[in-house]
Amino acid sequence: MTIHKPHKKRGKLIVEDGIKKKMEKDTIYIDNSGDITIGKNVIFTKNVTILTHEHYHKRNSTIKEQTEKKDVKISNLIVEDDVYFGINCVITESVTHIPKGTIISAGAVLTKNPINEYEIWGGVPARKIGERK
């Protein structure tokens, strides 16, 4: 597991029920600019990426100038219990809450919050593709 602080702010990382030991063995990239809380019985497979910041990118000046002036947009993420992150999935900074029992399928790019518990999300960008029965 790689916990990365790409900008000035470093958020808190709270991991419940000791899964941090298992996470250390996997190739998980966590941008810890914002606060992240990870619930119980969460499974991370290989190459999961979690992002908690985004650059400003209006057309009135360069992205570099905007970053120097405003820094970056920071978001926080709450991952509830019993969530499964499929191989090579990406969670973007616009996601702030992943409900209990959610599955994010292999290769998915999650750009918005899943709505209800026990949904299955897949695709690029990810959308609801099913529910756990």
Image: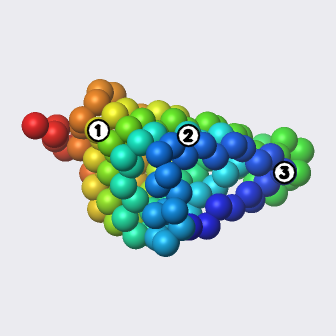
Point out the frontmost of discs 3 and 1.
1
Give the Cα distance between marks 3 and 1: 33 Å
Q: Is residue 58 visible?
A: no
Q: Residue at x 27, y 51 (%)?
A: 122
Q: Is residue 41 visible?
A: yes
Point out the frontmost of discs 2 and 3.
2
As drawn, the label of residue 57 is: none
Decide: marks 3, 1 in contact (CB < 8 A)?
Answer: no
Give coordinates of residue 82: x percent, y percent: 33, 42
Pointer 1 residue: 101
Pointer 3 residue: 8
Q: Earlier in the sequence, mark 2 or mark 3?
A: 3
Decide: marks 2, 1 in contact (CB < 8 A)?
Answer: no
Vertical position of residue 106 compared to residue 129: above or below: below
Q: Nearer the viewer, residue 84 or 110?
A: 84
Vertical position of residue 122 compared to residue 127: above or below: below
Amino acid type for the residue under numbered disc 1: Gly
Q: Earlier in the sequence, mark 3 or mark 1?
A: 3
Give coordinates of residue 108: x percent, y percent: 34, 56
Q: Residue furthest left?
A: 133
Give the Cα distance between marks 2 and 3: 20 Å
Give coordinates of residue 121: x percent, y percent: 28, 45
Q: Residue at x 53, y 57 (%)?
A: 20
Pointer 2 residue: 37
Quadrant showing the C terminus = top left
Mark 2 secondary-structure assignment: strand
